[in-house]
Amino acid sequence: MAGGKELKPRAFSLDPRFSYLAKEDRYLFAKEEPKYKFNVIGCGLNGNEHIHVTLLEGRATIHGVFDKNPGSIELAKRSFASFSTGQELVIYDSLESACNDPAADALIIATPNYTHLEVLQVAIQSGKHIFLEKPMATTLEDAHQILQLAREYPATLQIGLQYRYKSMYTEAIHEAFERKSLGEIKMVNIVEHRFPFLDKVNQWNKFSKYSGGTLVEKCCHYFDLLNMFAQAKPVSVFATGNMAVNFKDFEYDGEKSDIIDNAVVSVVYENGIRGSFNLCMFAPMFYEEITLCGDEGYLKAYEIEDFLPVPRPKIYLEVLRGEAQPSRFCNPCYPPYIEESGHNGATFYEHVNFIDNIEGKPTNAATVEEGFWSVVVGVAAEQSVRTGKVVLIDELLK
């Protein structure tokens, strides 16, 4: 059967109610045959999200996995089996074999953050397309080294800063840069209030020497967004924060946790735009908010998951134009099976863009340079918290 332009939602091909149809009877419900094979390196929570989303998106499949933790491998097997691909999952016994297997077209690196440079140095020997989770590194030195490696790399090297694909941020980008509803942006403010850091293998995310600190590990997403909306390089960063509630009595292998659980960060950009970020990690919900203030309009958007039965919009966006132009109120969203696949659909569209990158199509996927600058702001903010002083980016980078 020839392929047409009819609407063919993935939801049809995934719906078990249509499983009675033979392959030759599937047209609207046909599954796209995968063109690419991915290997996943690091199969914890994030790695398994990538396995799930790869199989859900459909243009690629998972060929094999590598992880030193047996529990992570078992989770990967269950995630893979849930899609009933009819293929066997290859379990590699070394990083080198996972990276260099000629059967795989691309690598997804989702190992602990502090290992990214070490893993990448092996992965780039393969010449394969690479997806590297955020933050791309936990120190400026490692981030700079990755930046240098990427400049000569002949294949795709994409950084996992996927929040730009959340529906509210996608719409905010559209309003700011395509519709230009706000005029010239002057201020960008982002809020994240949420639960504490989740458990990890060996609890590495509770210690700054492994995570780079809370403002690098978790908040690089938001610094990426601040940088994107500012459309300029940061000049200075000032931050305050401390360990107020979380993990104050937490110890692992005799070492006490040292990560902060709240912060207020202020960033000044070369073009005069001011950005701010407000973090609280001991709130009883997940809440994100962005406001963009321009000289012609104002945008506010939020996303909330509070686990309560009271009905309210999960995602909301407003554009206020006063008397000059029409204002708008809306609820950006994706189909449920996409939103439920990870980070409210952001990971799904991150994969869409990764494959588009592989195929040479234009995307707004996070580049290594953008990943580098998100780490720069995070490192500067951590230093400012420790010293109580404004950090000048030029001096930091020296």
Image (cartoon, grey):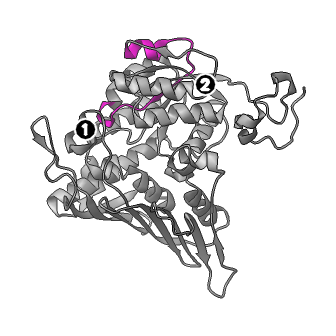
In magenta segment, residue 101: yes
Q: Quadrant of the N terminus?
A: top right
- Residue at the spot of label 1: 203
Whether residue 157 is visible to the viewer of this picture, yes or no, is no
Image side of residue 368 versus residue 178, left or right: left
Q: Residue furthest left?
A: 254
Q: Residue at x 9, y 37 (%)?
A: 254
Image side of residue 87 versus residue 192, left or right: right
Label 2's element? strand
Q: Which mark is residue 383?
A: none
Image-quadrant location for residue 381: bottom left
Image side of residue 17 versus residue 113, left or right: right
Image-quadrant location for residue 350: top right
Query: Vertically, is 231 above or below 34?
Result: below
Image-quadrant location for residue 149: top left
- Which stretch appears magenta? 94-115
